[in-house]
Image (tube, rainbow, N blue to C red):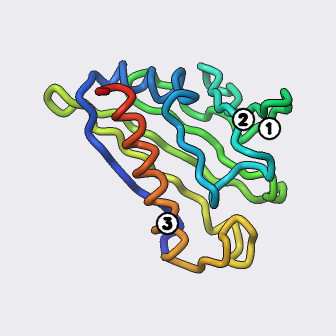
Amino acid sequence: MSSRVLVALRIAATPERVFEAFTREIHLWWRPNQLFRFTRAGPGTLAIEPMAGGRFTETQADGAVFEIGRVTTWEPGARLGLTWRQASFTEDQSTQVEVRFEAIGAETRVTVEHLGWDSVPAPHVARHGMVGMLFLQRHGQWWQELLAGLKAGIEG
């Protein structure tokens, strides 16, 4: 069984613009999800430091910062890679998000691949009792909603 989520969407903008919105404007289009939260606190504001090795963080209203992960690939207009973990993950549990930005005529196809869910066992709280493909499908639906928010923010 594959432990990846793969979703894609076309947006009417250049790859450079979509990359900029995805990374520097994530706080504007990201839609928190009750099931897939980074911490037990309410949803905070996301930010990605614009460089390889930069931090991917969520800042709460009280100023507390949770480091979700690190930027592993920073290629503006082409590729973004992030490590991704929730506060409930152990040290050896981490997932990876790979985002590709590809020009298709006057649009950009944004492809998100979220890998590594096999490091998070089925009974883990992050899976909310969902096993196998059901969890991956639900997580994929959330990524589709997120990309729709990105699209609306750019084309809007």
As rendered, which of 63 and 2 lies closer to the eye? 63
Residue that carries the numbered disc 1 in the rendered image: 66
How far from the left and from the top, in percent, is residue 133?
49, 76
Q: Image quadrant of residue 90? A: bottom right
The quadrant of the rendering that contains the C terminus is top left
How far from the left and from the top, in percent, is residue 92?
79, 58
Q: Identify which residue is drawn at 34% across, 34% down.
A: 151
The answer to whether mark 1 and mark 2 are in CB contact below 8 A is yes
On the rendered structure, is 101 left or right of 97?
left
Q: Earlier in the sequence, mark 3 or mark 1?
A: 1
Q: Identify which residue is drawn at 81% across, 32% down.
A: 65
Query: Element type at marker 3?
Result: helix
- Dot label at residue 142: none
Residue 59, compared with residue 139, is above or below; it is above
Q: Image quadrant of residue 13? A: top left
Query: As shown in the figure, which amino acid type bears the numbered disc 3?
Result: Arg
Query: As shown in the figure, which amino acid type bears the numbered disc 2?
Result: Glu
As rendered, which of 14 and 63 lies closer to the eye? 63
Q: Label 3: few (<14), some or many (≥20) within 10 Å?
A: some
Residue that carries the numbered disc 3 in the rendered image: 138
Query: Element type at marker 1?
Result: strand
Q: Identify which residue is drawn at 71% across, 29% down.
A: 55
Q: Label 2: few (<14), some or many (≥20) within 10 Å?
A: many
How far from the left and from the top, in percent, is residue 80?
50, 33
Q: Earlier in the sequence, mark 3 or mark 2?
A: 2
Residue 55, compared with residue 130, is above or below; it is above
How far from the left and from the top, in percent, is residue 3?
53, 67
Query: As shown in the figure, which amino acid type bears the numbered disc 1?
Result: Phe
Label 3 to label 2: alpha-carbon separation: 22 Å
Residue that carries the numbered disc 2 in the rendered image: 58
